[in-house]
Image (spheres, grey):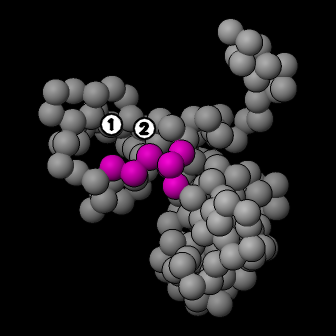
Amino acid sequence: MELLKEVANISGQSGLYRILKPTRTGVIVESLDGKKARSVVGANARVSVLKDISVYMANHQDNAIPLGDIFMAIKEKYGDKVEIAVKTASDTELFDFLDSVAPDFDREKVYPSDVKKMINWFNILSTNMPEAFEKVEETEVEKTAEA
């Protein structure tokens, strides 16, 4: 899930974007959809990199689990696509889904809208950026650590 440091959500815009490179006034991004449209996002826009997002946990030592770990759990349990109709799903259905991949998440700090975003983001990534879910072999990680 190391590729999540290149993927961002931009407040006020739907979908996910790959961060290409910085400019003097912001960053150049490319949409992760079929269009692959590029645009410049200004420095005053709120850009959230997926690598920095965590899910609050009730009984976890760090009180949060990285979004990448949640995505890997979803991938293992549900495959390439989550078949929940996000727009019509009830809060109970959304929380049951998240509970199936991340038991003990904090139900007071995690909102249904957060779960909807997670499902949408997972589906976008698995469709348009499946390489984000490829597991890096231990030998490659060790080689990188040694270098």
Q: Magenta span covers which residues?
A: 47-53
Q: Which residue is mark 2?
A: 18
Q: Position of residue 94 (x, y in %)?
A: 63, 81
Residue type for callout 1 = Val
Q: Amino acid at mark 2?
A: Arg
- Distance, label 2 to label 1, CA atoms, is 5 Å
Residue on which disc 1 sits:
29
Give me the disc on residue 55.
none
Quarter residue 137 falls in? top right
User: Circles 2 and 1: CB distance less than 8 Å?
Assistant: yes
Would residue 86 be visible to someone looking at this image? no
Residue 66 highlighted magenta (yes or no): no
Helix, strand, or loop for circle 2?
Answer: strand
Q: Position of residue 39 (x, y in %)?
A: 24, 38
- Badge 1: how crowded within 10 Å, few (<14), some, or many (20+)? many
State the residue at coordinates (51%, 38%).
Answer: 5
Find numbered disc 1 in the image and state the secondary structure of the residue it sits on: strand
> Is 14 rendered above or below residue 136?
below
